[in-house]
Amino acid sequence: MVELRKENNFAELQKYTELLPVKRNETRWSSTFTMVQRYIRIGPEIKKVEAVEEMLPTGAKHRKILALFEHIKKFENVCLRLQRDDTDLAEYPVMSEHLKASAKIVETPAFEAGVVNVIRGCDGSSAEKLDLKSFEVGQAFCKKRKEGEEDYACLLLRNGGKKERRPRKEQITFLWTVTIPPTSNAVGASVLPMQVGPYTSTSLHGSSKLLTTGIPQS
């Protein structure tokens, strides 16, 4: 793909397709996926560029690239799914041993376990409820949360590829816990404090008032 970006080769390629060759960016995983995807899509047109024809993989090498693409396509799907705004702490990917609330990296196990229980509609322990006290609101401010659609990436992220139906309470009394991303530990460990109005927070722990600004308490 690098050779195709050279001026003469690029001009020749443009005679057959409007799609541009993609160069891999070492600092971005998505560019690797995009590069392979684009190579497969404009493969027939690339063969018409004489200067790079001999460099193209053929036979077994080409089939290996096609097989590899099927794997990285799944990986790309999972990466995008983990970055979605509706991904929460109750999602259990195949690497759950390292991401679960009781993992060694977790600074506040009771808080994160409590968030998971609230999202799943389960009753937590007294310690968990205490850590989530700042998120508690009155019934008037509770809203129903729609069940998210099961997509391909969700099935890949869960053990065995089986759908897991998560029971939910009719109302969530700990508002905004569903918006806490699975990377809360990394955020909470930041040495840069976040400012919201008169409140300052360096963590997403329950004692923080960062996420409760302006919410009436029950």
Image (cartoon, rainbow, N blue to C red):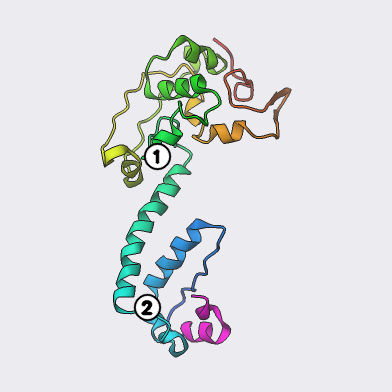
Magenta region: which residues?
1-14
Please say whether residue 9 is one of the residues in the magenta stretch: yes
Based on the displayed image, in which of its 4 quarters is residue 41 positioned? bottom left
For label 1, the SS is loop
Residue type, mark 1 in image: Met
The answer to which of 74 and 48 lies nearer the viewer is 74
Among numbered discs 2 and 1, the one appearing first in the sequence: 2
- Residue 184, located in which quarter of the rendered image? top right
- Quickly name the residue at label 1: 95
> In the rendered view, does 177 fall on the left or right side of 78?
right
- Report the amino acid beneath label 2: Pro
Q: At which x and y percent is residue 120?
A: 37, 24
Query: How dense is the environment of label 1, judged by Cα within 10 Å: few (below 14), some, or many (20 and up)?
Result: few
The reply to whether residue 175 is visible in this rendering is no
Residue at x 44% of width, y 61% of height: 33
Residue 93 relative to residue 133: left or right: left
Is 113 situated above or below 65?
above
Q: Where is residue 132 in the image (x, y as percent from the top left)?
A: 52, 17
Query: In this rendering, is residue 72 above or below 90?
Result: below
Q: Work out whether residue 153 can be spotted.
A: yes
